[in-house]
Image (cartoon, grey):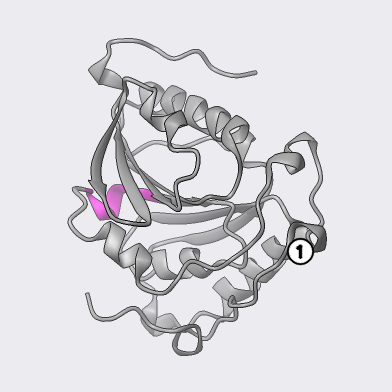
Amino acid sequence: MSKAPSDRELGIRTQRSEGIERLDLEGPNRIHAERYEATPPGILDEMLLGLDVEWPAATFTDLGCGKGRVVCHAARWPFARVVGVELSATLAEQAQANVAAMRPAHRKAAKVEVQQGDAARHRFGPGPQVLYLYNPFRAPVLRAVVQHLLTDLTRHRAEAHVLYFEPMARAVLEQRPEVSLVAEARRWAVFRVAPGVTGETPNALE
């Protein structure tokens, strides 16, 4: 794949960072949220290259998608579906606007959407999953995410890869026997999640 395009080339606007105090966060997990800052261009491609994934069958999910830069860059890959989930209604609206504004020539994913909601409540559908995180929330929310991911992967007999940029809470993943590290660089780590390796069925959260 060629060099990752800039926001201007994609037709989107995602650069400006936003502190927590500027975000309209609601719900009990707002206390675990982190500030918004866009992923540097090229990072996603760097993490995806060499990944053993059946792209046309896979769903890519960016939890804490902010203004949608990674959602738009993931849409440049031939995923079956690209989903962004964002707790802030304001940021979710901006991400939706950016997805709509993205130049069609760059888009390869079959379906792209942004949802406003709590990542701790997100559920994953059938097929292989690729989950992206740019340190969007602290460990308590990530634990809920991992539990739901394991439950849904077990139900659908699927596997996942977690792409974690600035992995501040990586211990949440590393403590699970179903999770293994498959690639790592200075600022990111990629994990494979395969529930079947333990023979256990994780308990679903309420």
Q: Is residue 54 magenta?
A: yes
166 relative to 54 in the view: left or right = right
- In the rendered image, residue 20, in percent from the top left (x then y), is placed at 75, 57
Which of the 4 image quarters holds residue 129?
Answer: top left
Question: Who's the residue at 48% across and 66% down the image?
Answer: 39
Question: Who's the residue at 54% across and 68% down the image?
Answer: 38
Residue 187 lies, with reference to residue 205, above or below; the image says below
* Furthest-bottom residue in this view: 8
114 relative to 50 in the view: left or right = right
Residue 54 lies, with reference to residue 205, above or below; the image says below
* Furthest-top residue in this view: 200
Question: Who's the residue at 44% across and 14% down the image?
Answer: 202
Q: Quadrant of the N terminus?
A: bottom left
The residue under label 1 is 90
Q: Quadrant of the C terminus?
A: top right
Residue 201 lies, with reference to residue 56, above or below; the image says above
In depth, the one of 200 and 100 nearer the eye is 200
Look at the image and give the residue range highlighted in magenta.
53-59
- In the rendered image, residue 37, in percent from the top left (x then y), is placed at 59, 65
- In the rendered image, residue 41, in percent from the top left (x then y), is placed at 41, 74
Q: Which class describes the residues within 10 Å of circle 1: few (<14), some (14-19), or many (20+)?
A: some
120 relative to 104 in the view: left or right = right
| Amino acid at dot 1 | Thr
Question: Who's the residue at 73% across and 55% down the image?
Answer: 88
Which of the 4 image quarters holds residue 128?
Answer: top left
Which of the 4 image quarters holds residue 144?
Answer: top right
* Furthest-front residue in this view: 186
